[in-house]
Image (cartoon, grey):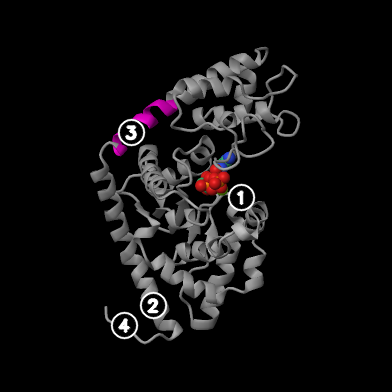
Amino acid sequence: RPRVLSGIQPTAGSFHLGNYLGAVRQWVAVQESHDAFYAVVDLHAMTIPKDPAELRHNSRMAAAQLLAAGLDPERCTLFLQSHVPEHTQLSWIVECLTGFGEAARMTQFKDKSAKQGTDHTSVGLFTYPALMVADILVYRAHQVPVGEDQRQHLELTRTLAERFNGRYGATFPVPEAHIPKETAKIYDLQDPGVKMSKSASTPKGIIELLDEPKTTAKKIKSAVTDTDTVIRFDQDKKPGISNLLTIHSTLTGAGIQELEDKYAGKGYGALKTDLAEIVTDWVTPFRTRTQEFMDDPASLDGILLDGAEKARSVASDTLRDVYDKVGFVPGRR
Ligand code: ATP
Ligand code: MG
């Protein structure tokens, strides 16, 4: 079974529908066919200042939501990044392998630092890609399920894996992007030209999975559409309706053509009413399961500690091999 590594940041309490339909749902499928390692990347979340109590809470919430969505600790390895020190240990080696200019070309850093100004930008935000490279290489992952926004960091991972192998001998598989079919990109309900995002969307534009069902229904019903009346998929001319059709189709499995036929002659209201019901029917048991995990923090932490132990057994092997290859004198084990 090919090995995969993927991570999600605990930047907000609730995941949004884009996180689920664009990433987490695939993780659930991938655990059946792959040797899957999934991390709540709390170290990455530190690149932007965080309140300690909130970070701790959000990390547990992220894990609870992943379990509620269907990750099974018997089928995959789920852990918190900070529980596996080998990530940061390998990340130093990766930093020393990365050119300064090479890191400075990363568009995520350029975008985020331009928004914040250099005085408010941490060195951690700059070295973030090196830590991400280490996250992947420390498991010698073959594939990485990533969204479009992470493509450049994956390219860097491939470059650095090859560089390490070239300099020190074959050590890492060069990981491929794993872009599962059925991956949907979900757009902001109020501004359907841009993606739904934890950090950029307004409350009305984002469907948070842990919202009250009433709130979810209201947000869907007030989604921005267009002045036309035909329910048809057209990303450029009708981004709002297209987004609603995508959400409907990915949650129900109905084809877009099938939905266009079903709603022929009906108004936008009918589509929105049905969709509000579909989303709340899905989200309601998800919220209950998340709450059950949050109500039992001892078992939740237990699952994460077991996951970290499995992760460390792989990561420490890799790190030992790397330390040996780069020329460190063996330490005591
Ligand atoms: P931020 O705005 O803080 O970057 P985010 O909403 O992009 O947050 P991430 O934690 O960066 O969320 O992403 C987690 C996963 O969800 C990634 O695999 C990412 O590609 C995916 N994802 C995020 N937003 C969407 C979206 N609107 N549609 C589809 N997939 C998405
Ligand atoms: Mg993001």
Residue 148 is tagged as: 1
Question: Can you tell which mark lies on residue 321?
Answer: 2
- Foreground label between 4 and 2: 4
The front one of 255 and 284 is 284
Mark in front: 4 vs 1: 4
Q: Quadrant of the N terminus?
A: bottom left
The tag on residue 291 is 3
Ligand 1 within 8 Å of disc 1? The answer is yes
Magenta span contains residue 285: yes
Which residue range is magenta in the image? 282-294
Mark 2 or mark 3, whichever is nearer to me: 3
- Mark identifier at residue 331: 4
**Mark earlier in primary sequence (2, 3):** 3
Q: Quadrant of residue 225?
A: top right
Name which of mark 4 and mark 2 comes first in the sequence.
2
Residue closer to the observer: 172 or 204: 204
Which mark, residue 194? none
